[in-house]
């Protein structure tokens, strides 16, 4: 297995090389290993996927649960892992930045902090406070013994503020505050991706959840995106498949869905390959 230092170096190189890369989102050790077996070069955790796994209808997870999930995914494969730290699970800058330290100690190569408050009445932190939070997070990230890549997220577009001007202003300020990567969930098309990329001087993460599913990696790379994630989409797809099989059994008495499942042998093989274990 690669050391944390080697994983961190590999993660940084992915952001420096030409083109874009896909960083899919597993929610446990098994799904991490399955994605690793397909040849992906890095993974990202998903708080929504974790909440789904834990059966949380409000999608809420604690800092301790996120860090433990991060550790399980980090230890499952040889790949660098970026951890979804939501808003740092605190409002005050130094308290929020503590989540960065904990993620680094758990072996993550990077992580994100967002400017969403989690309060339905006041969804986005005031500009200056949001910048102070990123600055505190960057100071902690860049002081770690193993380099930690900090992603700063501007959450306007998925919180009822369809204000691209303010979103870009925030991303630019987060770059000045020390963010290594920036991220604006809710971009809807290639033109908006291109607009954000042109406005900032850091690699841009794009999540596919609000994009037309027919948009390809090649198109996003041409627009300048560096990193492409899918958030909780794989978790939701797995749940959709699970529910379809459940309904077939309950409503039709059918087990035809079993024709589409992985064989026992393939499951063992892929989990082994994802963990770096190859037979023969």
Image (spheres, helix red, strand yellow):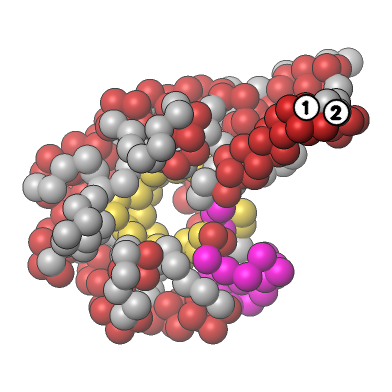
Left or right of 1 on screen, residue 204: left
Residue at the (11%, 61%) spot, across then down? 129
Seen in the picture, residue 77 relative to 240 is either above or below; the reply is: above
Q: Residue at x 82, y 32 (%)?
A: 252
In the displayed structure image, the side of residue 58 where residue 210 appears, left or right: right
Q: Which quadrant: the N terminus?
A: top right
Is 18 magenta? The answer is: no
Instruction: Please report the bounds of the magenta region as a residue range.
Output: 210-230
Q: Could you say where residue 153 lies in the image, as x and y percent from the top left? A: 33, 60
Instruction: Estimate the spatial distance between the alpha carbons at disc 2 and disc 1, rounded to whole Å.
Output: 5 Å
Quadrant the C terminus occupies: top right
Q: Which mark is residue 137?
A: none
**Residue 249 shows which numbered tag?**
1
Residue 247, by quadrant, is: top right
Do the residues under discs 2 and 1 have CB atoms within 8 angstroms?
yes
Residue density around tag 2, few if under 14, some if 14–19, many if 20 or more, within 10 Å: few
Q: Which residue is mark 2?
A: 254
Which residue is situated farthest in the front direction here?
Answer: 251
């Amino acid at each position: 297995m690669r050391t944390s230092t080697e994983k961190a170096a590999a993660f940084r190189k992915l952001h420096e090389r030409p083109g874009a890369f896909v960083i899919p989102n597993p929610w446990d050790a098994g799904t991490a290993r399955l994605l690793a077996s397909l040849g992906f070069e890095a993974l990202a955790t998903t708080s929504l996927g974790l909440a789904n796994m834990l059966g949380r209808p409000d999608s809420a997870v604690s800092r301790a649960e996120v860090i433990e999930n991060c550790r399980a995914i980090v230890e499952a494969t040889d790949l660098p892992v970026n951890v979804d730290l939501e808003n740092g699970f605190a409002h005050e800058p130094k308290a929020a930045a503590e989540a960065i330290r904990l993620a680094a100690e758990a072996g993550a190569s990077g992580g994100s902090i967002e400017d969403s408050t989690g309060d339905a009445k006041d969804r986005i932190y005031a500009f200056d406070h949001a910048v102070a939070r990123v600055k505190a997070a960057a100071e902690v990230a860049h002081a770690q013994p193993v380099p930690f890549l900090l992603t700063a997220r501007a959450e306007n577009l998925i919180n009822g503020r369809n204000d691209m001007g303010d979103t870009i202003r925030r991303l630019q300020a987060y770059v000045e505050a020390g963010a290594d990567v920036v991220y604006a969930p809710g971009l809807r098309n290639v033109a908006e991706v291109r607009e954000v990329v042109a406005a900032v001087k850091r690699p841009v993460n794009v999540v596919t959840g609000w994009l037309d599913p027919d948009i390809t990696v090649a198109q996003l790379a041409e627009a300048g995106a560096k990193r492409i994630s899918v958030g909780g989409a794989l978790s939701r797809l797995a749940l959709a498949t699970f529910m379809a099989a459940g309904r077939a059994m309950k409503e039709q008495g059918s087990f035809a869905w079993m024709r589409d499942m992985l064989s026992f042998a393939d499951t063992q093989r892929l989990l082994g390959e994802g963990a770096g274990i190859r037979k023969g």
